[in-house]
Amino acid sequence: MSFKTLEDFIASEYSSFETYFNIWKNETKIYINFPNKEDKNLCLNNNLKSINEDLNWLEKNKDKIEELLIENNSIELAENWASTAPLLDCAEEECYLMEDGQKVFFPITTDDFCNSLYIESISMEFDKCNEAPLLEVTLLCNPDYFGEHCLVVAIEKNKSLEFIGLTG
């Protein structure tokens, strides 16, 4: 899927525009912000191609975000959070019951963690109308290892990644 026209977006009270996009097999909310002094419709129209390119890059580079999260000890963080949930006695393995009703078995494997990730929202912040945006990606997990808290990753204009942390 890609955005072709201004009609794919709606004006928003929280950002310049909002829309939805399927990424990583999940419908994700996209927030796009342009500087207040700019003609927002013109900026959006002029940046449709770069918006699509950034979203396609994000779709194809899930592994880079997963690597960043693993390098920043997100699996250990998930285990720390999950271990505060009720411990179940019904399994041979260490198992916890999350707030969302799902069971989490320890240790959390890299595959389990990476497969649990999905993008809840993406913010695209344009400093100037005709520049590449900064992206902020908000990630959740299913099962919800972090008790309704989010992992946040920033993507710079040059596509370098920064782990912002756990929020919420």
Image (tube, grey):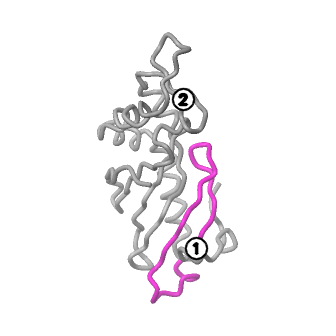
| Residue 140 appearing in the image | yes
User: Residue tagged by mark 1?
Assistant: 17
Highlighted range, magenta:
18-43
| Residue 97 disc label | 2
The residue lying at 41 percent from left, 39 percent from top is: 66
The residue lying at 34 percent from left, 42 percent from top is: 68
**Residue 88, placed above or below residue 42:** above
Judge left or right: residue 28 versus residue 78.
right
Report the amino acid beneath label 2.
Leu
Q: CA distance from mark 1 to mark 2?
A: 38 Å
Label 1–label 2 contact, CB within 8 A: no
**Residue 39, placed above or below residue 76:** below
Total marks drawn? Answer: 2
Residue projecting furthest to the right: 7
Counting from the top left corner in percent of width and height, residue 46 is at 53, 76
36 drawn magenta? yes
| Residue 118 disc label | none
Quarter assignment of residue 17: bottom right
The residue lying at 34 percent from left, 60 percent from top is: 156
